[in-house]
Image (cartoon, coloured by chain):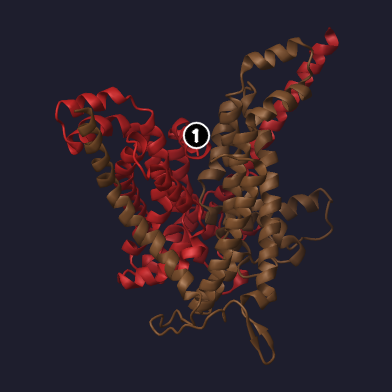
Chain colours: A brown, B red
Amino acid sequence: MAASIQRTRIRDAWLCLLPTCLVLLTVALWPLVRTVVMGFTDASLADPGDAHFIGLRNYLHREAQGWSGVLADPDWWRAVANTLVFAGISVAIESLLGLGIALLLNARLPLRALLRAAVLIPWAIPTVVSAKLWAWLLNEQFGMVNDVLLRLGLIAEPLSWTGSPRLAMASVIAVDVWKATPFVALLLLAALQGVPKECLEAARLDGAGRFLRFRRIVLPFIAAPLAVAVVFRLLDALRVFDVVYVLTANNVHTMTMSIYARLNLVDFLDAGYGSAVSTLLMLLIGLITIAYVRLSGLRL
Amino acid sequence: MNGIKVKRLFRRTAMLALAAVAVLYCIFPFYYALLTSLKSGSALFEVTYWPTSFSLGNYRAVFTEQPFGRNILNSLLVSTAVVFLSLAVGVLAAYALGRVRFLGRRPMLLLILATSMFPQVAVLSGMFELVRFFGLYNQLAGLCLTYLLLTMPFTIWVLTTFMRELPMELEEAARLDGAGLWLMLRRILLPLAMPAMVTTGLLAFIMAWNEFLFALTFTVTNDKRTVPVAIAMLGGASEHELPWGNIMAASVVVTVPLIVLVLIFQGRIVSGLTQGAVKG
């Protein structure tokens, strides 16, 4: 009897998974396979039907004048470097700032409810909108940021935040930090609330100072959730598109891997080359993620 | 003794000040957008920190100079459709993955997790081909189809963790009474899963509402665009003449409902987010 129920349940389980499998095949596996395959062809977005197999030519190819292909394009490597700088710095700041806000939220302060509501606002605002809000605040001529800095006498003349090569990346990072820190803070808050009060109390009675208690009890306890939050943020940051596209468009100083891929694919209509870039991007992100997960000893 | 008290007071004040700064940091850009959106003419280009004028001109302009109402409707239609599709497919999958032990369950979960993590751009050209193959280029249905890639894995993941925690007895009793799969799902699991579905649906809605890359790539005409693309594309005659008043008004219009939703469902959203991530 029980065995037959178990058999029925397993049959039902697969029945229930059927729509999921169908959707995943259609919108995930098939496009993924096609993208990889197209990377080995000269397909054009204007007429993708007329494509020929050209081997690794999109990746690397020796021509009379030298090497061609993604791997020989300095702009691609610049995009890789930009993405790594963006991801490294923004995720680091978001983790630290997120931890700070989580600690504030966890303390029994009068402003607690207000702060918890406030941090949800950047999180809920569409990325495009947050990029526009900041583009306005950072506007060279009429922006609030320059106005404040000028009034405080910190700068002598308005800075071109999103236009200058030196500041554009910092601006993009600042916007991403504003938008994404709340997510990290909320995840860490959940972890902080799980830290056993008895341990903290016992340590306090033993004379352990605030800092020691944090380092020896709180930090080990929230290390795993922090690592998870970092993976999520890292994956998001490595594929960043919207913020950069809206804030600095196709500026080479902030061009990320995703921007480079879409530029070739859609603007230059080069589906073959663009697909090769997409495939490389996926491999790179996969490698970085695996390396990070290994290093942090995270168990998924 | 007194020293300790002073120290504690000092620390508490410092923390309060920090919290106030954090609140200001989170809210200010939105507040400033609201201020800007209510200005008109040359006042737009003067930096002020308090409301100085109350003009709805920018709001009127956003809705009359381009099909912004249409864009909002598009976003609403696409996001709602995607939420219902993801929930329908997701709750079935969550039942299987969360309550039944079978060979292939773990690989399936890993596959879903992997899908939820891989970069959108990685499938862009394949997705383009798919959308065109179905004749859905520049169609809202094309966006619904492609958004499933983003919302469905997430929906399944969160609902699975929820389903796992429901008591087993109810289901077994129903089975022993001879109830089939559908009856059991509809009468027993679905009502229990409703709160979780509301939360997950809300998060999926926000995801779809905010999506940019696919919407930018798979639609071309103004009347098919969703809100994020419409806002990104709001432009003037040249790059130096961006209609900031209109852009800020549009931003406020699409953000206020989200903020209201988020504030109402605060507790649930926080628990939904942490379930989706931490239990991964």
The structure residue drawn at horizontal position 44% and vertical position 58%, both measured from the top left corner, is B227
Q: Is B253 left, or right, of A65 in this rendering?
A: left
Q: Secondary structure at mark 1?
A: helix
Q: Is residue B67 visible?
A: no
Number of numbered discs overlaid on the protein picture: 1
Instruction: Examine the rendered structure and indicate whether residue B252 appears above or below residue B196.
Output: below
Q: Nearer the viewer, residue B83 or B13?
A: B83
Could you classify mark 1 by the number of other residues whose Cα lies within 10 Å: few (under 14), some (14-19), or many (20 or more)? many
Q: Amino acid at mark 1?
A: Val
Instruction: Examine the rendered structure and indicate whether residue A194 appears above or below residue A273.
Output: above
Percent position of residue B19, x then y: 67, 31
In the rendered image, which quarter is residue B65 located in?
bottom left
Q: Is A89 left, or right, of B142 in this rendering?
A: right
- Residue situated furthest bottom in the rendering: A64
The structure residue drawn at horizontal position 62% and vertical position 28%, both measured from the top left corner, is A105
Percent position of residue A293, x then y: 61, 46
From the image, tell me which residue sits under label 1.
B270
Q: Nearer the viewer, residue B249 or A27?
A: A27
The structure residue drawn at horizontal position 36% and vertical position 33%, both measured from the top left corner, is B163
Q: Is residue B203 visible?
A: yes
Percent position of residue B192, x then y: 30, 29
Q: Is B55 left, or right, of A99 in this rendering?
A: left
In the rendered image, which quarter is residue A166 located in?
bottom right
